[in-house]
Image: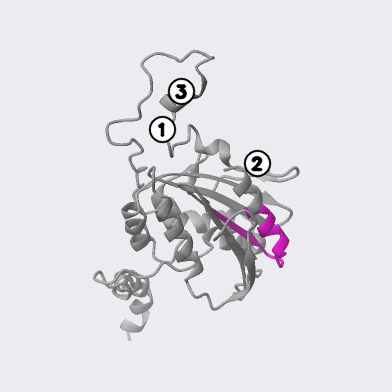
Amino acid sequence: MDTTHTEPQTEPEAELQTEPEHQPAAHPAPRTRRRGRTALLIATAAVLGIVAGTATGYAVQADRDPTPLPVLAQPGGVPYPAKPLAASGGAGAKAAVDPPGTVRDLRKLLIGRPAGSRAHEPESMEDGWMSVAGYAQYFNSPVDTFTWLVGDDVRRIAATSWLEGEHRQVDVMLVEFQPGAYTTVLKEIDTVRSRGYTDVTSGGAAAGSVRGGYYLFEPRQEAGFLPVYQALGYAGRGDVKVEIHLYDSRPIAERDIRKLTERQLERL
């Protein structure tokens, strides 16, 4: 009789222990659509209150050790000049400071939040940056995804987020790869396009990008929670991959995610 009371307490631990068995080490699992963790926090807050919703999100991360940012320096160091360049240095001076494929501050290429929106910084973002480990949390298999991204030579990730209206949240990420990794960016975009989503309701191409586009998905429904609608925008230019996640408790218009994706692409 006592075992019927102890089994529910050990069940979560068993699930955590068995989860890697679904991802064989010899055969990397395909990266699937993001879990929308932040969106679920929004839905939770709408039903239970802001405090309860926030506590739920942080409880998941409470026992995890922080993951440091990956090394950003290139082999041999970035060739900055020993002395400041003259203001009239011209194109040659600029080339000496910014080698091909690099950006002085990737955050300056992020689109700004619209008027009337509210600044928001999720746990995975800090001062406009996101670690590879934080980015991997958007996927269903964070550990496998982290390994995959490091192998793809991710250099850094700039990110921004804001809130609109009652429950809408927008997350924008610029994933920069090492210089000359244009084919890697194309591979990342093709990975998005080949996932074989079964819950896509609509989608289309993004102007200005050969492979860029967007998807809208069926809402996620859970008893006691508001529905979570999700849209994904993606594109690439040079060594940078654009990724945009839009969440709302109401249906999302195709125009909204398409315009966001095209606006961000124009800034690259």
**Foreground residue among 219 and 193:** 193
Q: Is residue 57 left or right of residue 251?
A: left
The magenta-colored residue range is 242-261
Distance between mark 2 and mark 1 Cα atoms: 26 Å
- Tell me the element at label 1: loop
Location of residue 145 by image quarter: bottom left
Label 1, on which residue?
99
- Tell me the element at label 3: helix
- Tell me the element at label 2: loop
Q: How dense is the environment of label 1, judged by Cα within 10 Å: few (below 14), some, or many (20 and up)?
A: some
Mark 2 or mark 1: whose residue is earlier in sequence? 1
Q: How dense is the environment of label 3, judged by Cα within 10 Å: few (below 14), some, or many (20 and up)?
A: few
Regarding residue 206, the answer to whether it shows in the image is yes
Q: Identify the residue at horizontal 46%, vertical 15% (top origin).
A: 85
In the current view of this chain or complex, which residue is farthest to the bottom? 1
Q: Is residue 238 left or right of residue 233?
A: left
Q: Is residue 244 magenta?
A: yes
Residue 237: mark: none
Which quadrant does the C terminus fall into?
top right
Pointers 2 and 1 in contact (C-beta within 8 Å)? no
Amino acid type at circle 3 is Gly
Location of residue 29 by image quarter: bottom left
Up-down relation of residue 120 to residue 94 (above or below): below
Label 3, on which residue?
92
Q: Is residue 171 magenta?
A: no
Percent across and percent down for residue 113 are: 67, 43
Depth-wise, is mark 2 or mark 3 nearer the camera? 3
Percent across and percent down for residue 236 are: 52, 53
Label 2, on which residue?
112
Q: How dense is the environment of label 2, judged by Cα within 10 Å: few (below 14), some, or many (20 and up)?
A: few
